[in-house]
Image: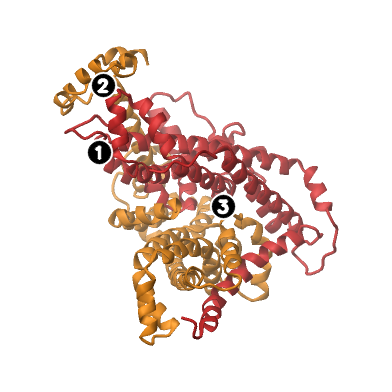
Amino acid sequence: MKTTDTATPGVETPGPSGGSGPVVTKTVPPAPRKESKSEGSVLNVFSHGVLIIWAIMVVMPLLWAVMTSFKTDRAIFTSPWSLPDSLHFENWSRAWSQAHMSDYFMNTIVVVGGSLIGTLLLGSMAAYVLARFDFPGNRFIYFLFIGGMSFPIILALVPLFYVMQNMALLNTPHGLILVYIAYSLPFTVFFLTAFFRTLPTSVAEAAFVDGASHTRTFFQVMLPMAKPGLISVGIFNFLGQWNQYLLPTVLNTEQDEKVLSQGLVQLATSQGYKGDWSGLFAGLVMAMLPVLAAYIIFQRQVVAGLTAGAVK
Amino acid sequence: MQHGKYRFIVGFLAAPLALYALFVIWPFVQSIYYSLTDWSGLSPEFGFVGFDNYSRMLDDEIFWKSLQHSLTLAVVLPLVTVGLALFFAFMLNVGGRRRRGAAIAGVRGSAFYKIVYFFPQVLSIAIVALLFQFAYNPNSGAINSALKLMGLGSIQPDWLGDPKLALICVMAVLVWSTVGFFVVLFSAGMASIPRDFYEAALLDGANRFTTFFKITLPLLWDTVQSGWIYMGILALGAESFAVVQIMTVGPNGGGPDYSTVVLPLYVYQKAFRDGQAAYATTIGVALLLVTLAFAAVVMKLGRRERLEF
């Protein structure tokens, strides 16, 4: 810290210590002249260093996994950090077909696809009614929905397991879809209610005066207008449901119905005995790549969707 | 707008509300009721036992361990994650050298950093946990072999197998996977702070530390506070369950000598491994109380005058 102060005379120190007008006018103007090449005060080097180190810490484990997925099991154990001697693509095909990765992918796509559509449809219906209509119990139902955001899911899981069992919904994709929708509703309703309140009422009223029913007004006028909100909340739910682990672990233990995250964990347990580490890493990377690729392509929307959710 | 209004309202609310009531509200209510019974979960019969489960819980050593670990996570994780994220976000948005007359700017390459930092956030927590389980492997894992490569071969910790280190390892993974989200979240908040404030501060000769503590942090306080609560709920809930359940196997699950067992994992084990459904819901109720208390404390501590700008 001492070196920081001494190494940057005239750039940093005069401000706080000198603090007087003349000194500042002397130090601020020179800055634009120097800055373009020499960003290099010690403080800048330090903060850049920390930023770079964190970037490396984020990327290294992912690169390591990709590298490992192309190695032989022997190489994984003897030299974990060396490059693969050749690209062993057979790890990938083994994981895809024999280790059921293709099945897990299909199950996940079915479950997440179904729940995403259901969540957006039911969530926007409930949010629209709660945002735009006055009726007794409106506030109560609204708080009932958003209260669900702060409850720990694990508490409900034990009774939920038996509710599902009694309704013969355990270990079925449609059962899992219904549960995903139910647990996505609190945030979806919360977000979309706020969003529907911001939409102008005049358009809906005009449609209604023209003879459209409430239902028709909703589907043909309000829903298209709510598209930005639906995209944000859709991305949020997509990531949450795609990455869901707790719910399927408890409610979906049938081998053939497993989704990606739990399938991989089970694979790790069973491959541990068989010693097929390379196949497991291939599966791991396989599961990471689609979301990472989607994120890089739709980077702006993903970030906007996720942060819009948390800030509101 | 009155024609057929109530029929429409009922028609639109019926399906979402029914689904929500059946799969969310009803199980929650039931779990509080079950916590007063001796239900095993294996057979349909059970008797009402009052607060027996609760007094049993107070004598349960593993419950106290899991409570202690959960509380540690709820305090340490938000502190580290939010702290790191604030530092990164400030560097990326405000901390750069002034160039071309702009009052504030991020450091060079800030757009790139923001993209990279967010990577872990889009990955499933289960995948992240698996990945780090291998990285922590004491014999051939990435971390210990990297230490060897750097000539630090004498330092080969047993990471997840060491009762003293296991919980820290778990926390590191949770920090790794969530910091990026908060960096982006705080960046969005910082972007909405008017530039005039920074310009005024620069004219007064404020350096970066002063700028951060006198301008950025106070104006960002609402976002920081909701981020804090969000992280705490994560640490108490599903995320910590996934990481602990996947990474720390141990003879009983929950690490060597229960060194990483957390409340949600203990609920899961009691309900689905030990066939003690009623006792599991009791611990679940305790977890609910801890979560609500945590949110209440943060809100109370964080209450400040609301700044409008």
Relative height, residue A141 to residue A72 (above, below): below
Label 3 sits on a secondary structure element that is helix
Q: Are there few (<14), some (14-19), or many (20+) residues within 10 Å of tag 1?
A: few
The amino acid beneath tag 3 is Ala
Label 1 sits on a secondary structure element that is loop
Q: Residue furthest bottom?
A: A211
Residue that badge 2 annotates: A41
Left or right for A255, reference B90: right
Which residue: 80% across, 52% down?
Answer: B53
**Do the numbered discs 1 and 2 sit on residues whose CB atoms are within 8 Å?**
no
Image quarter where the C terminus of chain B lies is top left
The amino acid beneath tag 2 is Ser
> Is B64 or B261 nearer to us in this picture?
B64
Task: Check the rendered structure and report the hue given to chain A.
Answer: orange
The amino acid beneath tag 1 is Gly
For residue B37, the mark is: none
Which residue: 42% across, 67% down?
Answer: A196
Label 2 sits on a secondary structure element that is loop
Q: Nearer the viewer, mark 2 or mark 3?
A: 2
Which residue: 43% across, 55% down?
Answer: A309
What separation in Å lies between label 1 and label 3 (alpha carbons)? 34 Å
Residue B105: give x, y in percent of width and height: 26, 36
Residue that badge 3 annotates: B238
For residue B109, the mark is: 1
